[in-house]
């Protein structure tokens, strides 16, 4: 493998919101098929990677800076074992797949709260793969990179394609590995997180239990076809019929149901034309008519909630990680 002349690289790892999220039945492999519209959003982590001279010892030094997260939001990250850290896992996977044997120093500056439905860990993993791709001057194909990404998590392939300049919004199917770039309108967004961590596995277990027990259906949601989703995406957000299948379950069965209701009411009262839950929680978001109204709403909501961020949808030009020198084939 060729070693790039670059010895360090910094990348932005954006979060995402799920504008729509439909969850299928549990599959034989334990996963669920989804149909969702992902949109990359400007709230991001910053990652810096440096190749070190360690005499051929393939070590990896990782420093996680959570100082920009509110108190309590970084506790899980502080005690996360190396085997669960997606950045370290991405680097290890890259070594196994390519034979890259240089030592790496990785600094991760966290702004995306963990276990929040925003894909922060998955985006960091995608950034790590893209960084290794560029630092090692690899010529592997996009499909191979996506195959590696899928081994790290269901959302990682989307973030790889976004960071590689392929898409910033997409219709996502399967476990998350089937990605179709779509044109989405520019969105002014306010993200609100109540300080609750929502584990993905626990959320799916709650959904399965509610469906089996017949409790998730008291408020039936209209399931949109793919064609309807994509057609609706081009409408004014005030007219979006999008839903998140986790939300009615949380509102009916979760101990935090009053929290989600309060956040969504608050976003609506502040002028959001569309409100939703992102991923499997715990972040909610609102879409606002313009940046000024989003800024005003964020200031009001910050009085009640520990994590409120004004953001906007982004294109790959804003991600700062589009490969140069031929790109990914």
Image (cartoon, helix red, strand yellow):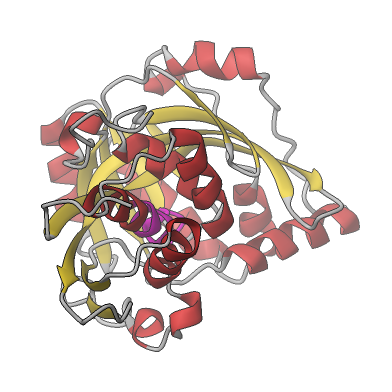
Q: Which residues are magenta?
A: 116-126
Q: Position of residue 139 (x, y in %)?
A: 35, 39
Q: Give the residue at x 56% y 49%.
A: 150
Q: Nearer the viewer, residue 284 or 270?
A: 284
Quadrant (top left/top right/bottom left/bottom right) for the C terminus? top left
Q: Position of residue 278 (x, y in %)?
A: 47, 48
Q: Is 122 colored magenta in this rendering?
A: yes
Horizontal side, residue 48 vs residue 284: left or right: left
Q: Give the residue at x 62% y 56%.
A: 251
Q: Position of residue 263 (x, y in %)?
A: 40, 55
Horizontal side, residue 9 vs residue 203: left or right: left
Q: Give the residue at x 41% y 40%.
A: 140
Q: Nearer the viewer, residue 29 or 244?
A: 29
Q: Is residue 114 above or below residue 67?
A: above
Q: Is 242 colored magenta in this rendering?
A: no
Determine which quarter of the picture holds residue 48. Answer: bottom left
Magenta highlight: main SS: helix
Horizontal side, residue 187 vs residue 85: left or right: left
Q: Position of residue 204 (x, y in %)?
A: 69, 59
Say whether residue 167 is visible. Answer: yes
Q: Give the residue at x 27% y 70%.
A: 102
Say whether residue 17 is visible. Answer: no
The number of numbered discs placed on residues in the rendered structure image is 0
Q: Nearer the viewer, residue 227 or 264?
A: 227
Q: Nearer the viewer, residue 299 or 325?
A: 325
Q: Is residue 57 above or below residue 189?
A: below
Determine which quarter of the picture holds residue 236. Answer: top left
């Amino acid at each position: 493998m060729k070693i790039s002349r670059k010895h360090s690289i910094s990348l932005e790892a954006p979060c995402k919101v799920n504008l729509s999220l439909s969850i299928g039945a549990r599959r034989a492999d334990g996963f669920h098929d989804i149909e969702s519209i992902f949109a990359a959003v400007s709230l991001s982590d910053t990652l810096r990677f440096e190749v070190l001279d360690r005499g051929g010892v393939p070590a990896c030094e990782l420093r996680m800076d959570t100082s920009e997260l509110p108190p309590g939001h970084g506790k899980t990250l502080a005690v996360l074992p190396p085997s669960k850290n997606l950045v370290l896992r991405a680097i290890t996977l890259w070594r196994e797949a390519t034979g890259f044997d240089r030592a790496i120093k990785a600094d991760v500056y966290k702004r995306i709260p963990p276990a929040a439905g925003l894909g922060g860990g998955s985006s960091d993993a995608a950034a790590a793969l893209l960084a290794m791709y560029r630092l090692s001057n690899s010529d592997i194909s996009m499909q191979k990179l996506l195959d590696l990404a899928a081994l790290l998590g269901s959302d990682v392939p989307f973030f790889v394609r976004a960071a590689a300049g392929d898409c910033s919004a997409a219709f996502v199917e399967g476990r998350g590995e089937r990605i179709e770039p779509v044109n989405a309108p520019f969105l002014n967004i306010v993200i609100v997180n109540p300080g609750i961590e929502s584990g993905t596995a626990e959320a799916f277990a709650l959904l399965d239990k509610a469906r089996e027990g017949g409790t998730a259906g008291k408020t039936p949601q209209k399931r949109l076809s793919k064609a309807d989703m994509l057609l609706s995406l081009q409408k004014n957000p005030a007219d979006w019929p999008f839903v998140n299948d986790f939300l009615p379950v949380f509102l009916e069965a979760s101990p935090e149901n009053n929290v989600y209701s309060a956040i969504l009411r608050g976003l609506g009262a502040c002028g959001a034309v569309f409100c939703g839950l992102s991923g499997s929680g715990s972040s909610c978001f609102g879409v606002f008519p313009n940046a000024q109204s989003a800024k005003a709403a964020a200031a009001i909501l910050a009085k009640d909630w520990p994590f409120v961020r004004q953001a906007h949808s982004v294109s790959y030009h804003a991600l700062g990680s589009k490969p140069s020198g031929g790109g990914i084939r």
